[in-house]
Amino acid sequence: MEDKSKIRLTNGVYMPLVGLGTSHSGGYSHRAVVYALKDVGYRLIDTAKRYGTESFIPQAIDESCVPREDIFVSTKLWPTDYGFESTKTAFKGSLNRLGVDYIDLFLIHWPEVSSKCSDKWGTLVETWRSIETLYDSGLCRAIGVSNYGIEEFEKLLPESSITPHINQIEFHPFHNPNDLKQYCDDNKIQIQGYSPLGEGYLVNEQIIKEMAYNHKRTAAQVLIRWSIQNSVPTIPKSTKENRVKENFNVFDFQLNDNEMSLLNGLHEGRKYIDSSKIKDKIDEQLPDGYKLDIHLNEMTNSSQNNRQQS
């Protein structure tokens, strides 16, 4: 029987349609991640070296009692680590912090490099070739990019031996780039969306609130359902357990054709993640997780409880 909670990538790997984001924006809640895995049914955890959250994931997986092989772990390579050998070194660092011997999805975080780099496109291609070798060696089940547009793909694809399996982009009704979606579809690249709630702003849009009322659902659930019905897997984030559960409970209702058409018509190119500042952030060389507000008491209490039980 077909599992409607997953989507099949071009290499045959199945990826969950809804995952849990763990970016440093908004903090990291250990309790929420354990709850998502153990009690709600999430099977995809999205992180990145940049977020500073990779090292917290092993404890959450351990406490969830969900087998590692049942969890789809996704992480990303930050631009300061781009380059053939440095990519491999950074990947090993992610493996160690995540406490795993393979990664389900490894992504180039941004199609951008530091100001000190004299050959942007050469560096990005060299980085991708390094990721291809990691995939060929079995250390990654799938590989891809994040925040890539058509221009970046036009530079990358002619130099690639493996077409990216994933392009992770900001995706919600106000940013629904049909030209990029069509391009990725034509090249068999699966789009995965982040910020499905538009950093929380979209849940207050009247048209979305009305649909939520009609379906006896929340605005967040309508937005996540819209993404799924557009065949775009999504990774909403929350540190609140009730929101984590709410965001996952989207497989038992359907938006009708008129509702989908109305939401699809909202696209205006509005993004809530300011990509124009990424180069500055790369050049600043701030530490990974510099914005992270960790719920340290959760992890401390959790560790103490584990010791008492053992």
Image (tube, grey):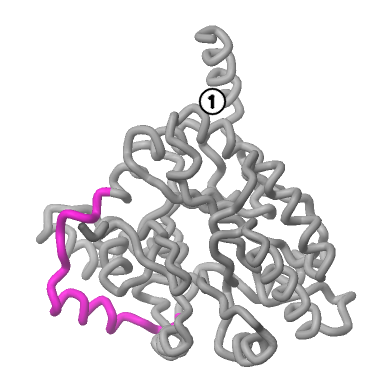
Query: In the drawing, does residue 12 fall left or right of residue 286?
Result: left
Hey, which quadrant is residue 130 in on the image? Answer: bottom right
Residue 265 on the magenta segment: yes
Report the residue at 37% width, 70% height from top.
232
Q: Amino acid at mark 1?
A: Glu
Q: Residue at x 60, y 59 (%)?
A: 140
Q: Position of residue 231 (x, y in %)?
A: 32, 72
Q: Main secondary structure of the magenta part?
A: loop
Quadrant placement of the C terminus: top right
Instruction: Check residue 305 for magenta coloring.
Output: no
Check the image and report above or below for 1 versus 240: below
Residue at 42% from the left image edge and 64% from the top image edge: 198
Region in magenta:
249-269
The spot of residue 185 in percent (x, y) is 41, 85
Residue that mark 1 sits on: 298
Is residue 109 among what the camera can see?
no
| Horizontal and vertical percent position of residue 35 | 40, 33
The residue that appears at 39% across and 87% down in the rendered structure is 178
Where, quadrant-wise, is the N terminus in this rendering? bottom left
Q: Residue furthest front?
A: 137
Alpha-carbon neighbours of circle 1 within 10 Å: few (<14), some, or many (≥20)? some
Q: Nearer the viewer, residue 36 or 96?
A: 96
